[in-house]
Image (spheres, helix red, strand yellow):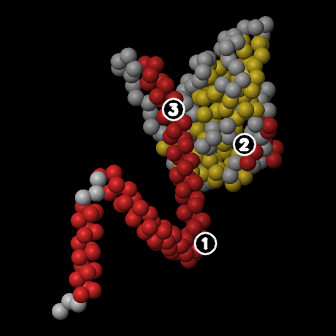
Amino acid sequence: MFKRPHYIALGTCALLLLALLNLPAPTSARLKLAVGGVFLPLFGLSSTAHSFVDEASYQLLPRQTLIREVRRLEAENDQLRLQSAQGTDAIAENNRIRSQLGLLPRGTWKPRPARIVGRDPSTWWRTLLIDHGTRDGARLNQPVITAEGLVGRIAVVGHSHSQVALIGDTACGVAVLVVETRDQGIVKGPQSTVESGIVELSTFQHSPQILAGHTVVTSGDGGIFPKGLPVGRIIDTRAANAGLFTTARIRLGANLNRLEEVWVLEQ
C-alpha cells in the first residue's frame, strides 16, 4: 500500500512528464541537448578507457611484431604514393585525348620491394646493388624507383642480386617530360652530378618557357621507363648550342645518397 509521500512523488512525476510533452519543439531540443551534456563526460570516460585498453594491448605485443607492422604500413604508404603519382599524370593525359578514339590502354606496373645491399666504391654515385635477382623475377632494364622519384634501371641481373644503374649516369639515359610545358628531353651523363642530387636535362628544342619549379616526369619514350614516373623539379635553365636547345638542372625527387629500400617495377 503506497503512503502519502509516494502519491505526492508519483503525481509530481506525472505533472513533469505532461509538462515535458507539451514543451515547444525548440525548447524540447535544448533540454535534450542539456541532458546529453550532463552525461557526455561519462561517454568520454568510457572512450578514454577503451583507448587505454587498446594502448595497453599494443604494449603487450612483441617488439618484432610491431616492427613488422610498421614496415608493412610504410610499404603500403609508399605504394599508394606511387599509384597517386602515376594517376595524376594519367588524368592529365586522359583530359588531353578524351575526344579521341581507339587509344590503347596504358600498361599496369606492379612494384616489388627490394633492399640496397651494397655499393661499389669505384662507382658509388653510378650504381648500387639490390637483393632482387632472377629468382625474384628480376629482368634487364626494369625500372627502379622510390615513392619520391625515379632511381634508375636494372643494368646487370644475377640469381639473387642485381646491379642498378642510377639516373644521371651515362648508362642510364632517361627520356623525360616537363609537365607544365609538355617539352621533352633526355637526362644523361656525364654532365650530371648525381652525388649532389642534381642531374641535367637537354631538351630537343629551345624552350624558354621552362621555369624553375616545373615538374619533370618520365615521358614513356624509349620503352624502358613507363610514362609519368616522377623524376624531380627544375632548378634553373640556360640556352645551349647558340640557342638551339635548352639545358635545365633538375633536383631529383629521390635522395640517392640515403637509399635503403627501393621498388622494382614489373609489368
Give percent across and percent down for residue 105. Answer: 40, 29
Compute the Cα span from label 1 to label 3.
38 Å
x, y percentage for residue 15? 25, 70
Q: Which residue is mark 2?
A: 256
Kind of residue indicated by mark 1: Arg
Q: Nearer the viewer, residue 171 or 261?
A: 261
Q: In x, y percent, where is residue 129?
A: 68, 49
Question: Which of disc 3 and disc 2 is earlier in sequence?
Answer: 3
User: Real-space Cα distance between discs 2 and 3?
Assistant: 24 Å
Could you classify mark 1 by the number of other residues whose Cα lies within 10 Å: few (under 14), some (14-19), or many (20 or more)? few
| Amino acid type, callout 2 | Leu
Q: Cβ–Cβ below 8 Å for labels 1 and 3?
A: no
Task: Tell me the number on the disc at residue 63.
Answer: 1
- Mark 1 and mark 2: span between their CA atoms? 30 Å
Q: Which residue is mark 3?
A: 88
Q: Residue furthest bottom?
A: 1
- Residue 46 image point, x, y percent: 46, 72
